[in-house]
Amino acid sequence: MGEDRETSCYDPPKNCPRTPDQAGEDKFMDNQAAIRFSRIPSASGAMARLAYAQAKAAGVSFEPLLKATGLTVQQMDDPGARLKVRDQIKFLSLAADALDDTFLGFHLAKIPDLRQIGLLYYVLASSEILTDALQRGARYSSIINEGISQRSTDGADVRIAFNYVGVSRHLDRHQIEFWMTALVRMCRQITGLRLLPTRVRLIHLRKGPCTELAEFFGTEVEFGASADEIVFAKRVGEVPIVGADPHLNTLLVKYCEEALSHAPRRLGSFRSSVENAVVPLLPHGKVRAADIARRLGVSERTFARRLALEGLTFSGLLESLRFDLANRYLKEEGLSISQVAWLLGYREVGAFSHAFKRWTGKTPRTVRSQHTAIPATITSATP
């Protein structure tokens, strides 16, 4: 796609007359966006604390990692303190780099006693059959992590899908790999069987061998997929739970419903919703503000206004998003420069190289060949 012309932000003419109805709609949307932006998704922080403990045990200087994510030692030492989901994602990424563990989330998910999850674990473990457990897990998973919406369906197969809410999906790989690994471990533990998914799909890219993951799941993991999901054969849904206790389950479900009733209904920024809608379309070279607005169910005017409330334009957001993805993709040695350019929506490698040099002062090939760290911010693009 063209570098700038096809992706410019929709800006309504300043002299365009607005009807009272339009003015009322704008004011309502502004208020709703302000409410949404003020409620940042949080998580129990168990993953981040496991990574923190791992870093300490390995002698890694964890203070810079905490500072870079805005987290504190007090938060990490207090198991009851909830963390912002986006901070947890960033901390896991930095810890993985510091520990030189590209599969940190997967490895961390194999460590803890799953009973430490608490209420959610016992709701699943007291259900009668696996389908019931998965459906309850999907409904109450936000108690553990408000940034992941889990959905379980039982049709031709048993399918568990994951969507990010109020958090940008493209920044993450370790949290979702932890989540999926822990879920499969839990299914095996509460049934007493080594259940094997028929399919495991993840949106983020990985190149090269992923033998550990394939051995754990019992199937090759599909990276760069259009969705995050785990699929089991239909018969797996009827597998009984070893510790089924209907009376206990009824009581725990009541507690979970009470917890949900106190949870905020609107979470996160509009930016994350836009980014999550843009990323799958980038390789197709058809990312336009009008198309994304339509996908999110808002008018072009409302789309531009809600971005503006967060200090953004669509063109600036798109450039910042491409930079983040370029940073991630260039670390994948199995991806050629031309493949990276295509994934970012550039028709020609030259256009990508030009943009990357504008962002960093270096060409993509130079950064990859020298194995140097890409700066954490774009020097010329609007964030």
Image (tube, helix red, strand yellow):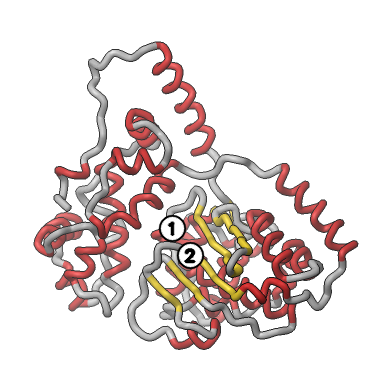
The answer to whether residue 307 shows anywhere in this view is yes
> Does residue 74 appear anywhere in the picture?
no
Which residue, given by chain and number where applicable, does mark 2 sit on?
A: 228
Name the element at disc 2.
Answer: strand
Mark 1–mark 2 CB contact (< 8 Å): yes
Q: Where is residue 124 shown, x and y percent of the image?
A: 74, 66
Asked if residue 164 is positioned above or below residue 9 in the image, the reply reads below
The percent position of residue 134, horizontal first and vertical second, equals: 67, 65
Q: Is residue 47 left or right of residue 359?
A: right
Decide if residue 105 is on the left or right side of residue 94.
right
Give me the residue at 71% from left, 59% from top.
136
Residue type, label 1: Arg
State how many labels appear: 2
Q: Residue at x 54, y 70 (%)?
A: 230
Which amino acid lies under the numbered mark 2 shown in the image of this protein? Asp
Where disc 1 sits, the SS reads helix
Asked whether, in this view, residue 355 is left or right of residue 343, the answer is: left
Residue 232 against residue 273 in the figure, above or below: below
Q: Which residue is mark 1?
A: 169
Q: Residues within 10 Å of mark 2 (few under 14, many from 20)?
A: many
